[in-house]
Amino acid sequence: MMNLKYFPLIGLLLATATPSAADVTSPLNLAQLRQTAADFEHGRGIKQDYGLAFEMYCKAALAGDSESAYGLGFMYFNGRGVKRDLPLASHWFKQAADRGDHHAQTMLSRFGDAPATEDPACHPEPVVTVTVTDNNPNRQIVEAWVNQIAPVYGIDPQLVMAVIKAESAFNPTALSGKNAQGLMQLIPETAERFGIKDAWNPVQNIKGGTAYLHWLLRHFEGKVDLVLAAYNAGEKAVERYKGIPPYAETQNYVKQILAWYPNATHPIPPQSPQKNLVIEVKT
């Protein structure tokens, strides 16, 4: 299992699909993202994962972090989790050197004749803009938002709609006795985990709930019943009971949603969001 201290940083990686919500460009967030990338690259305190290291270095490098650009160059130069590629290494070392990184300048001086090549695996992504014009939307508006947000995370919009129906019956002001808030009933800890600053903003709420579904679908390998049980009772409860927990509320919750969304499995979504997601609020 993943060390719990890394959850906020994974949340930050996911939240970079909404730069305005996560402020990934702040020096503190860039430093956190870069440090966590290095931990995944070298297996420091966490299982080594070159894929996550690359994703995090990429996010930070695209936001202007010179050390992360150097990290990508180093991975390509040494073939760490990627095929060794001197032109791509040169590209990232040049990006870092242009931002003042002395280590990158040294590397370029040693093999600067390698032609720099744009990296197809790490480049600015297309942007999906979701505009909030009504904090008390009807179901049709909610569905339009879900149809924009769910594909960013590689999730069937109908699954998200079924969860919203069960959680809040499409009431954006719903509040539970456990302080679960809004359309997807985010508790404050889950909102923070996935970079949501305002759970009462209906689009941010959908984004946070969808990001959590994305994580759960990957964690439980696309098994929809376990994903739903974990959304209701928490992933630890599902892991503890090795299946749907013996809670009447959770079992009824899973049964009800599967009546609306009768798919036992869901394709496992990609590791990180496929596009940038920007939320605009208009009054």
Image (tube, rainbow, N blue to C red):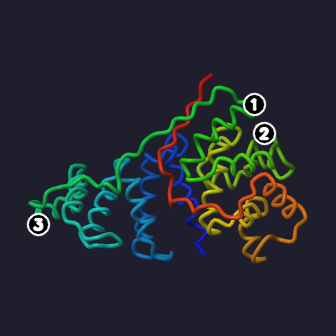
The disc placed on residue 170 is 2
Give the label, 3 or 2, closer to the camera: 2
Residue drawn 52% across the image and 43% down it: 18
Closer to the chain start, of discs 3 and 2, is 3
Given the current orientation, which residue lies at the most extreme right position?
248
Q: Position of residue 98 (x, y in %)?
A: 21, 49
Give the Cα distance between marks 3 and 1: 61 Å
Mark 1 residue element: loop
Q: Where is residue 195 in the image (x, y as percent from the top left)?
A: 59, 50
- Residue type (three-letter) at the residue carrying disc 1: Asn
Answer left or right for 258 relative to 133: right
Query: Which residue was labeled with disc 1?
Result: 138
Amino acid type at mark 3: Arg
Find the residue positioned furthest to the front.
262
Q: Mark 3 points at which residue?
A: 110
Relative to residue 255, is residue 69 drawn left or right? left
Residue 168 at x, y percent in the picture: 81, 44
